[in-house]
Amino acid sequence: MIADLRAMWRLLGLSPWRVAVAVAWGVLALGSGLGLAALAAWLIARAWEMPPVLHLSVAVTAVRALGISRGLARYLERLATHDVALRAMTTARTTVYRTLAHSDIWRWRDRTAEAIEGGSAGPGGAGVDSSARWGDLRRGDLLARVGADIDDLGAVVVRVFVPVAVAVILSVAAVGLIATISVTAAAVLAAALAVSGVAAPWLSAVAGRDAERAVRRDRGEFTAEALTVLDHAPELRVAGRLDATLAVAEQASTRAVAAEDSAASRSAWAAAATPLSIGISALGALLVGIAAYGPTGGLPGGMTPMALTILVLVPLSAFESVATLPAAATTLTTSRAALHRLRSLATTPPPSQHSPTRADSSVGAPGAGHRLPLALPAGQRIAVVGASGAGKTTLLMSWAGLFDTPRAGVTFFAEDAHLFGTSILENLRVARGDLTEDEAESALRTVGLGAWLETLPQGVHTALTAGAAAVSGGQRRRLLLARAIISPADTLLLDEPTEHLSAAEGEQLLRDLLDSDSGLVAPRRRVVVVTHQLPADHRADTVVTVDRTGACRVERRSLSGQ
């Protein structure tokens, strides 16, 4: 537990000073409530004795001040706490993205895909080496890690670290205040606070642990299957597997809902411990007060009416600080599970422990080629060809430096790059933030989207409300190509830019991309294109062929005779 808390603190990159400020505001907010309860109790009892009004003026003013400071301090505590949490989540996401960028996840994913295509993996990928856990990590799993898991980890600041620190400080203060009146009542309050602040959260954590694991497992399964359906619905329908995939997703969702209901039911029983503790504490304080009340009855040297009122009413306010701890325990359980999943991203076996993959395997006879990855060959127009699964995308990502240090001036444009639910202009500005409207229109016409642009009611300001779903596959490819063309990169690495285009259109686009004189891309810029079908009359000066063993052959071509 302590080790996990330290790991969370490090991963989130928490600032002790900022956390201390958030805790201080929380203590001031709930401390104002505690002081308000004590002072109001004293004021009620003292006013019953009908002293001169001036004797009560200071107390009345203090009640108003505490009432105002309670709301103000609570607002400032929320600002400080969420500032810490949002900064921490940004740090955690940066760390996770950096880990992904420097890992060999894509090679492991390629290996798993190839194994499944080759029939070596049974259901669930049983035929794949168990050490290749990156290969079993689907897009839905990655989305859950960089999304929901980091959100859960960030919640530990708002719902665990700060509330627990505030609860400990306020509980000690409340017990100390009651102890000045009655040690016995203070002991009763301390015991009740322990039940509400320690036993109830522990019960909540234990009750929700198994349910949390089930919820996360099934929710991750649902996310993965849902993404599969969203990305590949046409292919699944053609293969006759769409209904089965939807059924798996629905079953996972049903199991997740059932597990959540079970966790909520058990947490409700744990939460009942807090009201029970409040009742016992109030009853105990009342009985102690009645027994000790004087001056003519009760214990020798009994207490005043004001002390009796404070003794009974203050415990009711003292439990406000510990009331959130059962929820904090549940959040901590969730955050620890998220932490373990995130830490798995950084624990892939070192290369020496990996089983050879096609991309890492030897290529046979000397002179047969190079092992992936090889250095980016010379040439201004380079074509990379080969069968599916041979490692062409891996090669481009290696040239872009996505497996180690990103290369300056070299940009990789993936075939499934994201289109955001905003305007066409803003989607293009992903590549260059200072892009003007005229430049955007020129780029769209250059890649063959001029006629489509003329039909749009607001031109480049037309919103793609559904992202990639708002355009056809061919239009999406051309939009991504326009994004690549307007980027400031000197070297463009284009992965399958002609997919979803007709054969004739695709061939012509490839000819233009691989021809320095076509005007599509400036001659000074280097263009590397991955494709399955290379036109016979292309003008690429270098062709890299990747075979199924991962071997690469580099062919330099002379264009002087063409």
Image (tube, rainbow, N blue to C red):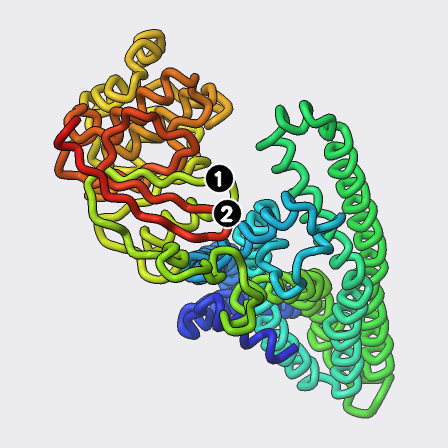
> What amino acid is at disc 1?
Ala
Quarter placement of the N terminus = bottom right
**Looking at the image, is 524 positioned above or below residue 511?**
below
Assess disc 2: are there few (<14), some (14-19) or many (≥20) residues with their C-alpha within 10 Å of its C-alpha.
Answer: some
Quarter placement of the C terminus = top left
The x and y percentages for residue 554 are 31, 48
Q: Residue at x 47, y 61 (%)?
A: 360
Residue farthest bottom in this picture: 300
**Looking at the image, is 43 positioned above or below residue 198?**
above
Q: 54 or 403, which lies in front?
A: 403
Which residue is the site of mark 1?
Answer: 387
Query: Alpha-carbon distance for marks 2 and 1?
Result: 7 Å
Q: Residue at x 25, y 25 (%)?
A: 512
Using the rendered image of the protein, determine whether residue 64 is visible from the camera's viewpoint. Answer: no
Q: Are marks 2 and 1 in contact (CB under 8 Å)?
A: yes
Residue 383: image quadrant is top left
The x and y percentages for residue 244 are 77, 32
Q: Residue at x 20, y 44 (%)?
A: 379
The x and y percentages for residue 104 are 47, 60
Q: 504 or 163, which lies in front?
A: 504
Using the rendered image of the protein, determine whether residue 145 is visible from the camera's viewpoint. Answer: yes
Which residue is the site of mark 2?
Answer: 548
In terms of sequence position, does the residue under pointer 2 or pointer 1 come before the other?
A: 1
The x and y percentages for residue 388 are 51, 40
Q: Secondary structure at mark 1?
A: loop
